[in-house]
Amino acid sequence: MRNLTLLTDFYELTMMNGYLKCGTAERKAVFDVFYRGVGGFSYAVAAGLEQVVEYVENLHFSDDDIEYLRSLNQFGEDFLTALKNFKFTGDIKAIPEGTIVFPYEPLLTVTATLFESQLVETALLTFLNHQTLIATKALRLCESTKGQILEFGLRRAQNADAGIYGARAAYIGGCRQTSNVLAGKMFDIAVKGTHAHSWVMSFPDELTAFRKYAEIYPDGCLLLVDTYDTLKSGVPNAIKVFDELTAKGYRPLGIRLDSGDLAYLSKKARAMLDAAGYDYVKIFASGDIDEDVLLALQAQDAKIDIFGIGTRLITSYTNPSLGGVYKLAAMENEKGELDPKIKVSNTPAKITNPGLKKVVRIYDADNMAAADLICLEDDVFDESKPLTIFHPEQIWKKTTFEKYRIEELMVDVFKGGKLVYKLPSLAEIGKRLDEQAASFYPEYLRVVNTQEYKVDLSQRLYDLKHKLLLNKG
C-alpha cells in the first residue's frame, strides 16, 4: 500500500505540534469512531477495517514528507524530528467488518498517546465512513428485493478509489458480483458484464448484432434488448438467436432491460420468453434503481431476476455521507490516571459517551438479536441472572431478559502497535454479513418504517455520563 501518512487534515498536525509544546503529547488518550445516524441510516454495516490496518501498518513520515512540511514554515525542527521518528505504538479495538451496527456504537476505538491518536483521525474516518456507507446502501438494496443485485458503479463513482473500494464495500453488503475488473482482481470478486447499446448500434441491424454476440459468447449469451424497441424487436430478435443457440446445444442466459417501464416490460418479456420455451432464462434490469424503485417493482410483481445498480449504489445517492466522527472519550491526567471525557452540546445528538467502552449484543431466547448495550470496558454481565436495560433518554422504557446470551462485538486489532488480528478474506466478511442479517428480525432491517432497534447504555455508563453532564452544567 502507498504511504498515506499525509492523508490528514492540517489541523491534526497543528494540534500535534501544540501537544508537543504543551508537554501533553505522550499522555494516553482514547478516541472513538461512531456515527450519529441523525437524518441518515438507522443501521449500518461495518466496513473498511482492512484498509485501516494497511494504513496503520504503513504509518511513517518519509524524507519527502518532512521536507514538504518544513517548506510550509509552520513547524519547528523539534516537531519535524518527532515526526521523522513517528511510530504507532497504541491499541486499536474495532467491530469486525460485516457486522450490523447502530448509531453511537464505537465502530473503532484508538488508545494511544495523544500525539499518535490525533494523527490518525482523518484517515480512519475516510476509510470507515466511505466503505461503511456503501456497504450499508448495498444491504438496504438487497433487503428491498428478492432479486440478485450486481454492483455496476465504477463509471459513476467519484473517483477511481471510490469505485474500487465501493465495489469491495458493496460486496460486503450483499452485492457479490461487480462490473469493476480491477476490483475483481484485487478482492477476488466475480466480474460480470455483457454488451452495451453501442454494440448493437455498431451493426447494420439488431438481429445481426445479437447473432454476432451469441457466436462469440455462446455459453454466456445475455442480450440487451432495448436499443430500438424492446417488445417489437428486442425480445423477438433475442428469441430468434436463442432458438439458434439451443439448436447448437447451448443454453442462453437471458435478456437485459435498461430503460422504460421495467415492471410492464419485464412482465411482457417474461410472457414472450415463456411462450417460446425459455422459462429458464433470466431477466436482468438496470437504470437508476434504488430502494424505492425495487420496492415498487416488487409491489407490481415485476418479473426481474437480477438488477445491475450503479449510480445510486456507488454514490449512496439518497444519503451521500455516513457522518462518522472521531471523538475523545478519555485522557490520562497528570497523575497517570485515565479521566473520562465528554463533549457537551446544545444539540443532544452531539453529546458523546465518555470513557473506555465496549459494545455487547443481547440475543433473546430464540437466538435473535434483541438489543445492544454500550458499556464501560470493565462492565460484567452474569447471563444466569435476569438483565434489565432501559432507554438512554426515556428511562422509564425498560426491557428485562430472562433467557439470553451476550456477545461482545469489538475485537483487538492492534496491541502495543503490533497487529494481533487475523484479517478475514472478503468472502468470510460477506458470510459474516449474511449471518448477521439472518440473526435480526426483518422489522429491524426493512427500509420503510424500520422498527427501532434498542441501543441502550449500561447502568454504569449512564451514571458516569450524567455525572459528567451535571458537572459541566
Image (tube, rainbow, N blue to C red):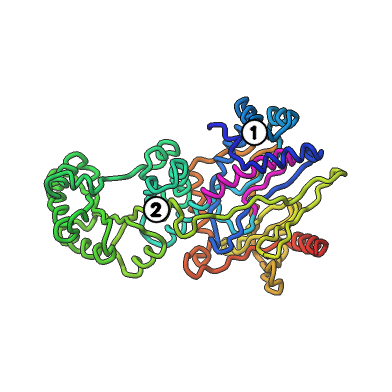
Question: Does residue 339 belong to the magenta stretch?
Answer: no
First in residue order: circle 2 vs circle 1: 1
Residue ID for mark 1: 72
Q: What is the tally of numbered marks visible in this picture? A: 2
**Left or right: where does residue 24 sit relative to residue 373?**
right
Mark 2 secondary-structure assignment = helix
The circle on residue 155 is none
Q: Badge 2: how crowded within 10 Å, few (<14), some, or many (20+)? A: many
Front one among 223 and 421: 223
Extent of the magenta region: 106-132
Q: Is label 2 in contact with label 1 (beta carbons under 8 Å)?
A: no
Instruction: Give the residue at x 14% y 44%.
Output: 203
Mark 1 secondary-structure assignment = loop
Please state the horizontal and vertical placement of residue 255, each as a whole percent of the image: 23, 53
Instruction: Give the residue at x 48% y 65%.
Output: 446
Please state the horizontal and vertical placement of residue 452, each as a whole percent of the image: 57, 68
**Left or right: where does residue 282 sit relative to residue 243?**
right
Front one among 341 and 442: 341
Please state the horizontal and vertical placement of residue 150, each as a whole percent of the image: 37, 50
Gap between marks 2 and 1, in whole Å? 39 Å
Q: Is residue 99 visible?
A: yes
Question: Does residue 123 belong to the magenta stretch?
Answer: yes
Q: Answer above or below: position of 296 versus 14.
A: below
Residue ID for mark 2: 311
Q: Is residue 379 visible?
A: no
Residue closest to the far bottom = 396
**Left or right: where does residue 372 sit relative to residue 212?**
right
Please state the horizontal and vertical placement of residue 234, each as a whole percent of the image: 17, 55
Q: Answer above or below: position of 133 versus 183.
A: below
Instruction: Give the residue at x 41% y 42%.
Output: 189
Identified by mark 2, the residue type is Thr
